Amino acid sequence: MDVIEGEPAIVNVTARANPSEMSYKWFRDGTAIKQLKEANAYDRVTFDGSLLNLTTVRRDDKGEYKCEATNSEGARSHIVRLNVQCNQRTKPFIIRFIPVTFCFVD
C-alpha cells in the first residue's frame, strides 16, 4: 500500500468470522502498536480496532505491519506492507551551477 510522506494515512483491515465479535491488535517488527485510547500526543502510529492510523507519515514508516484479529474460535493475521512515496511538495531538488566563460571581442 502506497502512502505519502508528510500526509496522514489510515489502513483498514477488516476480518469476517463467526462469531463476529472480534478484537484487533496491530504490530510492527514484532512490537505492539498502541491502541488509540492508550496513546499520548507523541504517538504518531496508533490503531483503533481494524484501523491503523498514521498521523503524519515519515520515511521510516515503510515496512510490514501485522493486523491480528481474534474471536472466541481463534486468531488470524494479515500483513500490510507500506511503501512511503515522496511528497512532491517536500521533494528535495538540486540546483546546478554551470560555469560560463564570456569572451568579449572589440
Image (cartoon, rainbow, N blue to C red):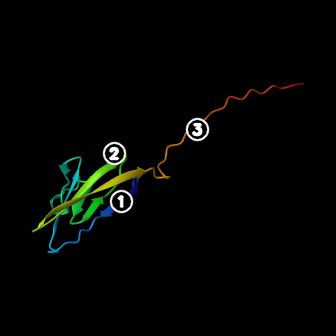
Q: Residues within 10 Å of mark 3 (few under 14, many from 20)?
A: few
Q: Residue 95: which disc?
A: 3
> Which residue of the protein is positioned furthest toward the right in this rendering?
106
Report the residue marked by disc 2.
60
Q: Nearer the viewer, residue 9 or 66?
A: 66
In-image side of 64 versus 27 (left or right): right
Residue type of the residue flagged with mark 1:
Pro
Q: Nearer the viewer, residue 5 or 26?
A: 26
Q: Where does residue 2 sit, x and y in percent of width and height?
A: 41, 56
Q: Are marks 1 and 3 in contact (CB under 8 Å)?
A: no
Q: Mark 1 or mark 3: which is in front?
A: 1
Q: Mark 3 or mark 2: which is in front?
A: 2
**Which callout, 1 or 3, points at the residue further toward the start of the chain?**
1
Q: Nearer the viewer, residue 68 or 55?
A: 68
Residue at left offset 26%, top offset 68%: 14
Residue at left offset 21%, top offset 53%: 27
Report the residue marked by disc 1.
8
